């Protein structure tokens, strides 16, 4: 049975009449006859010509689907092409724990989104009904959002480096710009809490409400990168 290198597998991407090959757990499969791989990309997310061992766990099906397709070779053990720009120790780590390639950011990014959205909502309710408990809840949620934001940004940059080679795409530019704006807002509130600056009542309300569209747009651009809109 033929032994494929990562470079050889990468060339079998279904383009220009080439076959569509994928690898899973060291085995190379020919999925050229699958209508779901007809354009060389599965569900607008998974390109062919690569090892999908680390991504199958996130799919709505199990590895049993590969039994439908012929195994035409085995994958030679070597750092995949998409990892070769990384330091050796990180290549080995990601090959041992493939979920670390993409999962850290989704695991933490939802915390600041949820906390900051909820904080805006509770402060708006406080503004309407003037109940102190709503204002206190808003402040606590804001503090949690501020604490969780650096972890979301750090894992986002890590994912960008690992999976996108730090390429500055349109969505990445927007996410960086919005992240800077989000951090500036959070720093403003920290300075207000420690008494370094003064914020009027209505300005405080405007800044609180501003959190909602910022995190919504951050979530939207992140979603577009993970699940591109079909044209």
Image (cartoon, helix red, strand yellow):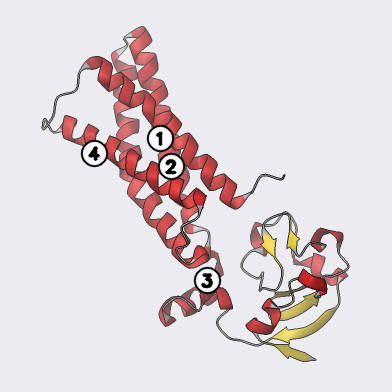
Q: Residues within 10 Å of mark 1 (few under 14, many from 20)?
A: many
Q: Earlier in the sequence, mark 3 or mark 4?
A: 3
Residue farthest toward the front in the current orientation of the protein: 16
Image: 135 above or below 179: above
Residue 145: x and y in percent read 35, 38
Q: Disc 3 versus disc 4: distance between alpha carbons?
A: 35 Å
Using the image as rendered, state which of residue 126 and residue 18 is in the foreground. Answer: 18
Left or right, 167 with respect to 8, comes to left
Image: 139 above or below 38: above
- Asked if labels 1 and 2 touch by Cβ distance under 8 angstroms, the answer is yes
Residue position marked by numbered label 4 in the rendering: 187
Question: Which quadrant of the figure contains the N terminus?
Answer: bottom right
Residue position marked by numbered label 2 in the rendering: 111
Q: Disc 3 versus disc 2: distance between alpha carbons?
A: 23 Å
Q: Give the mark toward the camera: 3 or 4.
A: 4
Q: Earlier in the sequence, mark 2 or mark 4?
A: 2
Q: Disc 2 versus disc 4: distance between alpha carbons?
A: 18 Å
Using the image as rendered, state which of residue 221 and residue 25 is in the foreground. Answer: 221
């Amino acid at each position: 049975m033929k032994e494929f290198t990562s470079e050889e597998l990468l060339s079998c991407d279904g383009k220009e009449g080439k076959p569509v090959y994928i690898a899973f757990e060291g085995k190379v499969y020919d999925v050229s006859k699958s209508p779901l791989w007809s354009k060389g990309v599965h569900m607008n997310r998974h390109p062919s010509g690569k090892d999908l061992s680390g991504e199958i766990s996130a799919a709505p099906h199990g590895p049993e689907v590969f039994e439908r397709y012929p195994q035409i070779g085995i994958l030679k053990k070597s750092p995949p092409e998409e990892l070769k720009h990384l330091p050796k120790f990180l290549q080995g780590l990601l090959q041992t724990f493939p979920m670390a390639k993409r999962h850290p950011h989704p695991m933490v990014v939802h915390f600041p989104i949820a906390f900051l959205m909820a904080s805006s909502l509770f402060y708006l309710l406080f503004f309407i009904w003037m109940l102190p408990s709503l204002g206190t809840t808003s402040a606590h949620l804001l503090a949690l959002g501020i604490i969780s934001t650096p972890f979301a940004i750090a894992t986002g940059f890590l994912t960008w480096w690992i999976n996108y080679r730090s390429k500055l795409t349109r969505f990445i530019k927007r996410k960086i710009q919005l992240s800077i704006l989000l951090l500036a807002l959070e720093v403003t509130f920290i300075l207000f809490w420690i008494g370094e600056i003064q914020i009027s009542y209505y300005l405080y309300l405007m800044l609180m409400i501003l959190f909602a569209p910022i995190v919504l747009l951050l979530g939207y651009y992140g979603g577009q990168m993970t699940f591109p809109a079909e044209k």
